[in-house]
Amino acid sequence: MLSMPFLVLIVVAVILAFSILTAALSRYRRCPSDKLLVIYGKIGKDASGEARSAKCVHGGASFVWPVIQDYQYLDLKPMTIEIDLKSALSRQNIRINVPSVFTVAISTDEGDMINAAVRMLGLGAQQIKDLAADIILGQLRQVIATMDIEEINADREKFLANVTHSVGAELRKIGLKLINVNVKDLVDESGYIEALGKKAAAQAINQAKKEVAEQERDGEIGKANAEQERRVKVSAADATAVRGENEAKITIANSEADRREREADAERRASAAEKIAIANALKEAYEAEKNAEVKRAERVRATQKADMIVPAEINKEKIQIDADAKAEQLRREAKGTGDASYLKMEGEARGIFEVLNKQAEGFKKVVEAAGKDPQAGAMLMIVDKLPEIVKMQVQAISNIKLDKVLVWDSNGSGKDGAPAAANFLSGMLKSLPPLKDLLDLGGMNLPEFLGKEKEVEAAKASGKQVVKEKNSTKQSGDTPIKEKE
């Protein structure tokens, strides 16, 4: 455990250190941007080994040692100084008044800051203005003494440059910087500047009048020259225009002739091209029509072929399909009704098959008997049905109900001495269509074994040659005798 004296010593040391730190911080000075911090006292030596009188700080901070150093601030704000210079003697020994306004401020250059710290530290703003005004008055008089009034009045830039150079150099010696110079109107006591102004005004007026007269003279001369030039150029232009018009008319005539020639040539070529195009179009139309007719004929031929063959094939397939369907139906019905029904239907199917088979064999033998001619075989089958056909003819009039037939014959006899009633009955019977005519209507002929036509038989009996054609018989040297095949 620490002893009491040791603790007291520690507390005293801490307090002393805190006091030193607080004192040190209180001596650390910051310089504002519009101020110049000047530290004076024991500063040290400069580069040449001489003791420095002050230390200037602008825009920063520095530590000021207590006891051996101190500090002050110089204001950097610009100061406006009005200088009312009167009776300043020019180089022409003419006194003039030069009212002007100068704007100055403490310089921030390294050497100028030391001059300001040495010569103006502790001075107030008015004292600094008075000091600067005295310097400006002396230098301004000196600059005016080296220049003429005309030069000062006419060349203000040169006058201001001289003033800035002379006054600025003197102000830097006390640490000030010349910012601006504004010289007001110059006035002299003798009225020289006013006379110069009147002289300049008169000269300007006279010069202006002279220039106006010269300009008017030049204007009249120019007007006359311009009128002359206009007339010459107008005449030349008229001549050129007439010549141009004539050349243009010639060019237009030549162009018109060329146009008409080209139009005629174009019309001729267009007509020829149109005729050639029409001929080619007609040729193509004829070719297209020919191809269309060929295609149409092929289409008609294909259509007719399809109309004849396709229905036959469809009918054939339909018969086959119907037969297959019928057989399938019978098979399924037979299978559903049991073995007895199956055997019955199978027997009936066999019977039908045998009947159809026998009929087919009979048809085959009929065709073979007709010399393997299907048409002749069909004719034989039709002849077999002749009794039924005759019966149908007789039945055609059998149903006519005649309660009474009255025959009135004024002559008492008919044709060939036959009674009129006999002729009536004979005509009624003849009104029935003959068998041969019925067959002819159907496109069929009677077989030879059923009889031949009389003319054909007579021709063959006389030994004449009979030429057979389809549906016709020709006798050489005589009128053809038709014979149905």
Image (spheres, rainbow, N blue to C red):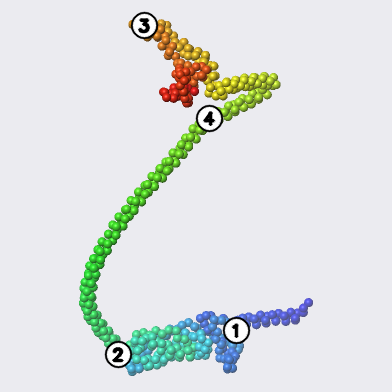
Total numbered labels: 4
Numbered mark located on residue 192 in the image: 2
User: Residue placed at 32% from the left, 55% from the top?
Assistant: 266
Q: Which amino acid type corresponds to the residue marked 4 in the rendered image? A: Pro
Give coordinates of residue 243: x percent, y percent. 23, 68
Q: Which residue is mark 3?
A: 413
Sequence-earlier tag: 4 or 1: 1
Observer-side mark, 2 or 1, equals: 2
Q: Judging from the image, what secondary structure is the residue with disc 2 in?
A: helix
Above/below status of 416 relative to 340: above
Alpha carbon of mark 3 to alpha carbon of mark 4: how far? 60 Å
Whether residue 100 is visible here, answered yes or no, is no
Q: Are marks 4 and 2 in contact (CB under 8 Å)?
A: no
Query: For numbered disc 1, what is the local secondary structure?
Result: strand
Three-letter code for the amino acid on which mark 3 is drawn: Ser
Residue type at mark 2: give it.
Answer: Tyr
Q: Compute the Cα span from label 3 to label 2.
A: 186 Å
Counting residues from the start of the chain, the first of labels 2 and 1 encountered is 1
- From the viewer's perspective, tell me whether residue 372 is left or right of residue 174: right
Near mark 4 (Cα within 10 A), the count class, few <14, some 14-19 or many ≥20, is: few
**Mark 3 vs mark 2: in front:** 3
Residue 122 position, x and y percent, is 51, 88
Q: Nearer the viewer, mark 4 or mark 1?
A: 4
How much space separates mark 3 and mark 1, taking CA atoms?
A: 186 Å
Q: Earlier in the sequence, mark 3 or mark 4?
A: 4
- Locate residue 355: give its quadrant: top right
Upstream in sequence: badge 3 or badge 2:
2
